[in-house]
Image (tube, rainbow, N blue to C red):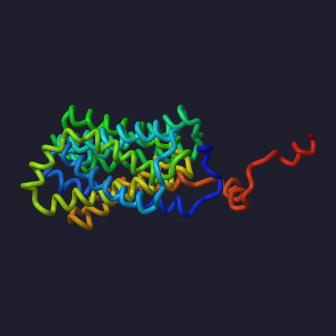
Amino acid sequence: MSTTPSRRPDPLAAAAATVTVVLWASAFVSIRSAGEAYSPGALALGRLLSGALTLGVLWLLRREGLPPRPAWRGIAVSGLLWFGFYMVVLNWGEQRVDAGTAALVVNVGPILIALLGARLLGDALPPRLLAGMAVSFAGAVTVGLSMSGEGGASLFGVVLCLLAAVAYAGGAVAQKPALGHASALQVTTFGCLVGAVLCLPFAGQLVREAAVAPVSATLNMVYLGVFPTALAFTTWAYALARTTAGRMGATTYAVPALVVLMSWLALGEVPGPLTLAGGALCLAGVAVSRSRRRAGAARERAGTAPGPRREDADRA
């Protein structure tokens, strides 16, 4: 089955990408609460178990069966890198650096996704995508610098966040070929299971910490599993199957802007002018990266692929 996305705009894919971005942004707020009571590995395992249970119920209800054999390589790689390694390392890194530094370093991920997608999947790198990513990354840098606290970062923490960004990019790119053979729900469900198995060594920590953790922290951990993991990773996979890895990665640059807004509304953290400017740049870059040339958009609305110019056809 081909993994080449259709050129026709898909409103459902755009809606799925929006759901993903909003829920992933909300995860940063929940992680701050749950991370005060749970260690990095225990939090990752609890989140993955909640997500796997939710996804497993949906998978059984929909009776989608096991993914085809060609999909398993991508599922296994994304499960190990993104669902497992990424979540543990990011939780660990965020305990050693401030939120701004973590957001700044992890936002190298979309750039790596675009480069890996071009190298391994043959994805195009149109000028608008590159320009939009440059604008969004500048916005992420601005948000990161404005939120960084003095002395809040350590070299080891920065390295952990950088490893998280690499794992995020590798896992996202590995998913793309798998989605050419299996459904978004299948890829997400079994990727989450792979990640949960990888984190099983933290089961003892999870049991001990859950026994003394505040109810609010445990509820935030469950929320992370059900919504930012089970739902958001499924909508991500649905959208990824219908566009390029680079374009989907660029979409996630909206996350820092939404985190600023959610922190303002939920935590009362009033953003400064520099933070607001960085968030605006992130959103502007996403808009540029997802825009298309007017002529190309007109062809897509008409459902036609670009062909030879009339004068070239007349010569033939």
Residue at 32% in and 53% down? 52
Residue 9 seen in the current view: yes
User: Residue 207 in the image: x percent, y percent?
Assistant: 13, 49
> What residue sits 23% from the left and 41% below the top?
200
Name which residue lies at 35% across and 47% down.
192
**Res 277 visible:** no
- Foreground pick, 160 / 174: 174
Q: Nearer the viewer, residue 261 or 42?
A: 42
User: Which residue is situated farthest in the right direction here?
Assistant: 315
Check the image and name the residue furthest to the bottom. Answer: 265
Spot occupied by residue 134 in the image (x, y as percentages of width and height)? 47, 43
Above or below 275: residue 141 = above
| Quarter of the rendering occupied by the N terminus | top right
The percent coordinates of residue 272 (x first, y second) are: 27, 58
Nearest the viewer among 187 and 281 is 187
Snapshot quadrant of residue 85: top left
Seen at 59% across and 40% down, the residue is: 124
Quadrant, the C terminus: top right
Q: Position of residue 314 (x, y in %)?
A: 92, 45
Residue 185 in the figure: left or right of residue 274: right
On the rendered structure, is 36 left or right of 5?
left
Classify 175 as above or below 263: above
Is residue 141 rendered to the left or right of residue 177? left
Q: How many marks?
A: 0
